[in-house]
Every structure is written in structure tokens, then in C-alpha cells.
Image (cartoon, rainbow, N blue to C red):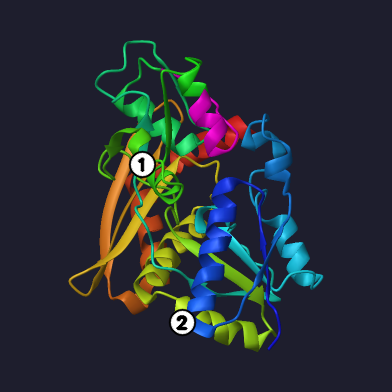
Amino acid sequence: MRTLRIGTRASLLAKWQAEFIRKQLFAATGMEPEVIVIKTAGDKMQHAPVTQIGGKGIFIKELEEALLEETIDLAVHSVKDIPTDVPSRLMFPAVCRRDDVRDCLVGSTLANLRKGARVGTSSLRRQAQLRHLRPDLDLRDLRGNVDTRLRKVESGEYEAIMVAKAGLDRLGLSQRISEILSPEVCMPAVGQGAIAVECRLRDTEAGDLLAPLDDAETRSAVIAERALLAALHGGCQVPMGAWARVERGELLMDACVCSVDGSQCVKQRATAPPDQAAPLGEHMARLLIEAGAQSILEEVSRQRA
């Protein structure tokens, strides 16, 4: 039996995710894959805002190149890092069961933050929704891995930071959470909390080995959210959130688009059968645009030009 080579980013969280997949494969097949660490552009340029270093694909481009060059066999990604355009020679045989989708605050609760408190997050989506809730806060860009971000709260550089709860849970740092924000308060990023494994399209052996790790409900949710993202031509730098999930046999989806300054926030909800995930995402895009999202997206586009 061949030894599969799993490619991962260098961050603690990315390595945890790769190790999680390695253990899952071992449990399912008895094989011992090898984990190979690859530095991506997003890892190398931790002090620049995401908008300045290219946005789409900055955390996975080098991993996909390694797959195509056959120096690795599998690449493990956070779904929210994956652009909507996937190279035609690659595929995702496994979208693992989703963990907690919610965002959280470390350092303080939202209610306890004083007027003008400095809060750090690298996400335009989080910044826009926080500004909608608390326009009095001083929101700053925050890059770096989880450890770096937590240290910036400890040192007093930020009174709070906003991060994905799933990341802290996976690293055993849940006790650091000051407040968990419900999706009604802060809509998650597309794919947040989900891990996907990518391989070459013609590598049917790897695809077959990964198939048992796939979770049908998570895949449907992710397809719907990514279809919405594609329809709105969004990358990680569009202030939109989405959350699809299967409830009572129906695929239910909430989504929002916020203006960068937080003054406007358009929200919509829709449902469809789970096998109609992509059309649901496209339908949601139309609902948001009809409700006023188009002018917000055009303004964001002008600001980035």
C-alpha cells in the first residue's frame, strides 16, 4: 500500500487539521500517511492586511501547486480559505463533518467593551458586523496565527479579538473565550468550521480512501454557501456571511451583506431540499441583491479599486 503524503500550512491550527485527517485515515484504512508542511503566501506575509497580498487563495495556492506537481497527494484546508474557482485537475472527495460555525470574542464580552475599545480582527466580514452592532469601537486589522493573536490580548495591545470558535476548540483553547456570538449577532464566514481534503482528479485511489470521511449534510451546506459566494463574486474580502444547515430534512440558509462602515446590513433566509444546494445559494444571492445588497457590493468594489 502506498504512503499518502498530506500537505498542510505551517500554522498550529493547520497542522492540527492535517493530523486530524491523518488519524481519520489511519482509523478507516490502517495506513500511516506522512504530513508535509508547506509555507503559503498567507503564512509568509503575516503582517500585511489580506487585501494587500492578494486575498483569494493566499492560504492554499502553494498546496494546490504541490498537488499538481505530485510532491503531495492530499491537501487539507479550512473550507473558508478555498476560493470558489478550483483548478480543473483537482477535486474535494471529503468535506468533513462541520464543527462550531460561530465567531467568538477573547478578552472581553461585547457588552463590557468600553466606548473606543480597540478590537482586532483580520476579517472585513467581522469588522462590518461589529461596526453594525457597536459603531463606537476602534476596529483594527489583526493578522498572525492563533498564538500571536492571543498574545496581543494578553499584552493589552487589544482589549479583545474576534476569532472563529472552531479554531480555539481544536487547539484546546476554549477556556480563553469571553463570549460566543450567535449567527444572529454575527453571521459566520462561508465554510467556517469545516475542513476539506483535496486531491488530484485522476487519483481515484486517494479519492476512494477519503470518501468515508465525507459528511453529506456538511457538503450540502458548503455547496450552498459557496454558490452564494460565487454568485456575488465574493472573496474573503467581501463583508458577507452565510450559514446553511440541514434542519428537519430541509436545507436552511441565512445570509447577510453589510456595508464596510456597518451602517447597512441586509439579511435574508431561504430553504430548499438538500440536493438543491447550489440553486439555493444562487437563489439567496438574488434575494440579497433584491433587498439592497447590490449597492453595498458596488461600494466595496469601488473602495478596493
In the rendered image, which residue does mark 1 sit on? Answer: 174
Query: How far is mark 1 from mark 2, CA to CA?
Result: 28 Å
Residue flagged by tag 2: what amino acid is it?
Pro
What residue is drawn where x is 68% and y is 76%?
Answer: 4
What residue is drawn where x is 38% and y is 44%?
Answer: 165
Q: Is residue 213 left or right of residue 107?
A: right
In front of the other: 292 or 227: 227
In front of the other: 89 or 259: 89
- Quarter of the picture holding the C terminus: top right
In front of the other: 59 or 208: 208
Percent across and percent down for residue 142 are 55, 28
N-term-proximal mark, 1 vs 2: 1
Percent across and percent down for residue 285 are 40, 56
Residue 207, quarter of picture: bottom right
Residue 212 bears which disc, if any? Answer: 2
Label 2, residues with CA under 10 Å away: few <14, some 14-19, many ≥20: some
Determine whether label 1 and label 2 are within 8 Å by CB. no
The residue segment tinted magenta is 138-151
The kind of secondary structure element at disc 2 is helix
Q: Residue lying farthest left?
A: 248
Percent across and percent down for residue 298 are 52, 39
Q: Nearer the viewer, mark 1 or mark 2?
A: 1
The kind of secondary structure element at disc 1 is helix
Asked if residue 263 is positioned above or below residue 209 in the image, the reply reads above
